[in-house]
Amino acid sequence: MATVLSNERLTASVFRLAIEGSFHGEPGQFYMLRSWDKSPLLSRPISIHDLTSTAITFLIRVKGEGTRLLSRLTSGDQVTLYGPYGNGFPKPDGSVALVGGGMGIAPLLFSAKRFPFSKVFLGFSGEPFAVASYQALHGDVAFQSGGTILDAIDLNSFDTIFACGPLPMMAELRRRTTETAAQLYVSIEKRMACGIGLCNGCTINVGTGNHKACTVGPVFPAEEVDFDELLEL
């Protein structure tokens, strides 16, 4: 069990949950969180938003009962964390772009801290959130609400691109990078029950066969991902 430091409401449905303790992890990895006993049955997979020597932070969007309970936590409450799980973003080569859409911005703050010479692109379909955290940490941040943030990126300027966001955004980014030299890695969100590869609930089809997003992923080289199949699910 760990203690909640703060739980800040950023929008009507998005919260920034900070938990006290000495945790570890890499950009793109996730933890399984729960603040309840028996119901809901499953913990919730949440990517690392930020990590310091004394606390770990997560962005949470209320989508169901589990995230609703997490959103109601207040300072001093207890929460259970398991992790870190999954394979995160690899060590990049050359110039780096971090591209996030909506809640896909969540793992990119820790990534921007770890890769300080990267350029950050954040896109939102509605009200922006957490942008000030990126701006305080990183001098090169582009963000917009509405339209597509992809139009703001000169893809030929980067050697490595890390992306997380809605599947259509990442599929389009993959299409746009096909004729460039940039190596694109994408973080794929899938429903997860266990987080450790036992339940097979997060299996996706990549170039080398079916793999579990919780153990082999959630980060994959974009050229291995069958976006057409994922968009049909």
Image (cartoon, rainbow, N blue to C red):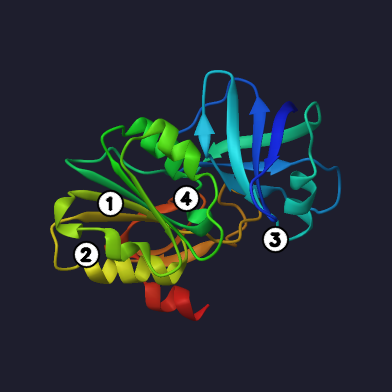
Marks 1 and 4, the one that precedes in the sequence: 4
Q: Residue at x 54, y 36 (%)?
A: 84
Q: Are marks 3 and 2 in contact (CB under 8 Å)?
A: no
Q: Are marks 1 and 2 in contact (CB under 8 Å)?
A: yes
Per the image, the residue denoted by label 1 is 161
In the figure, residue 59 lies in which quadrant? Answer: top right
In the figure, residue 93 lies in which quadrant? Answer: top left
Label 3 crowd bin: few (<14), some (14–19), many (20+), radius 10 Å: few
Name the residue nearer the viewer: 142 or 83. Answer: 142
- Per the rendering, the mark at residue 105 is 4
Classify 81 as above or below 76.
below
Q: Secondary structure at mark 1?
A: strand
Q: Residue at x 27, y 51 (%)?
A: 161
Q: Amino acid at mark 3?
A: Lys
Q: Amino acid at mark 4?
A: Ile
Percent x, y of residue 33: 68, 42
Per the image, the residue denoted by label 3 is 63
Could you give the CA–CA distance between mark 2 and mark 4, rounded to whole angstroms?
20 Å
Q: Amino acid at mark 2?
A: Thr
- Per the rendering, the mark at residue 177 is 2
Label 1 crowd bin: few (<14), some (14–19), many (20+), radius 10 Å: many
Percent x, y of residue 199: 62, 57
Q: Residue at x 83, y 43 (%)?
A: 36
Could you give the CA–CA distance between mark 3 and mark 1, rounded to whole angstroms?
28 Å
Q: Is residue 84 left or right of residue 18?
A: left
Marks 1 and 2, the one that precedes in the sequence: 1
Marks 3 and 1, the one that precedes in the sequence: 3
Could you give the CA–CA distance between mark 1 and mark 2, rounded to whole angstroms?
9 Å
Marks 3 and 2, the one that precedes in the sequence: 3
Classify 130 as above or below 200.
above
Q: Amino acid at mark 1?
A: Ile
In the figure, residue 200 lies in which quadrant? Answer: bottom right
